[in-house]
Amino acid sequence: MSDRRRESSEGQAQGKEGRSPAEWTTLAISIGIIAGFLGVVTWLYFRGSEEPPLITVEVQMESLREEDGAWYLPIEVRNDGDRTVENTQVEGTLRTGEGEPQEASITVAFLAGGERVEGTLVFSDDPRNGELEVGPTSYQIP
């Protein structure tokens, strides 16, 4: 019976001698991950105020194409601010001098700060032959 106690005591003593290299490595990696996470959270908290959304629309006239009597005008919608927006409405109005102005619109469901999205407005007349106005009309902040 005393042999069993001695083996148990020796096993406990070996366990108290120190950590193995694998344990030290795991501990170092864990501490690094936690420190990195805390660093990112701290940086996000203290980085200052976020710029409000600034929606800009750029017309890609060089990529204009005509198919089956419809004119497809590519646009690029950008959020130059820091805050995310949803349901951004972009409208285009084409005045050719004949009849009522043509209107086309597109809705961008989600636009993060600094993000760019491409879309297309469709008109029945060539946008190069009239006065074209394109711009954002509304958005929501989530």
Image (tube, rainbow, N blue to C red):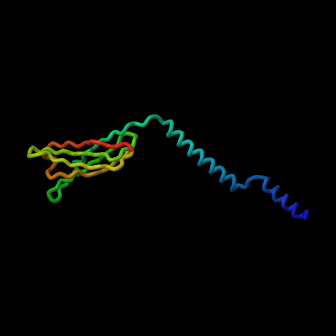
Q: Where residue 40 sits: x, y (%)?
A: 53, 43
Q: Where residue 126 sits: x, y (%)?
A: 15, 50
Residue drawn at x 22%, y 48% is 61
Looking at the figure, which quarter contains the N terminus?
Answer: bottom right
Q: Where residue 38 sits: x, y (%)?
A: 57, 43
Using the image, determine if residue 6 lies above or below residue 35.
Answer: below
Is 90 left, or right, of 9 in this rendering?
left
Looking at the figure, which quarter contains the C terminus?
Answer: top left
Residue drawn at x 23%, y 45% is 91
Q: Where residue 78 sits: x, y (%)?
A: 33, 44
Is 52 left, or right, of 67 in this rendering?
right
Dividing the picture into quadrants, the one containing residue 81 is top left
Residue drawn at x 21%, y 45% is 92
Using the image, determine if residue 124 lies above or below residue 136.
Answer: below
Residue drawn at x 46%, y 34% is 48
Is 70 left, or right, of 98 in this rendering?
right
- Looking at the image, which residue sits at the far left? 98
Is 46 left, or right, of 12 in this rendering?
left
Front position in the image: 13 or 128: 13
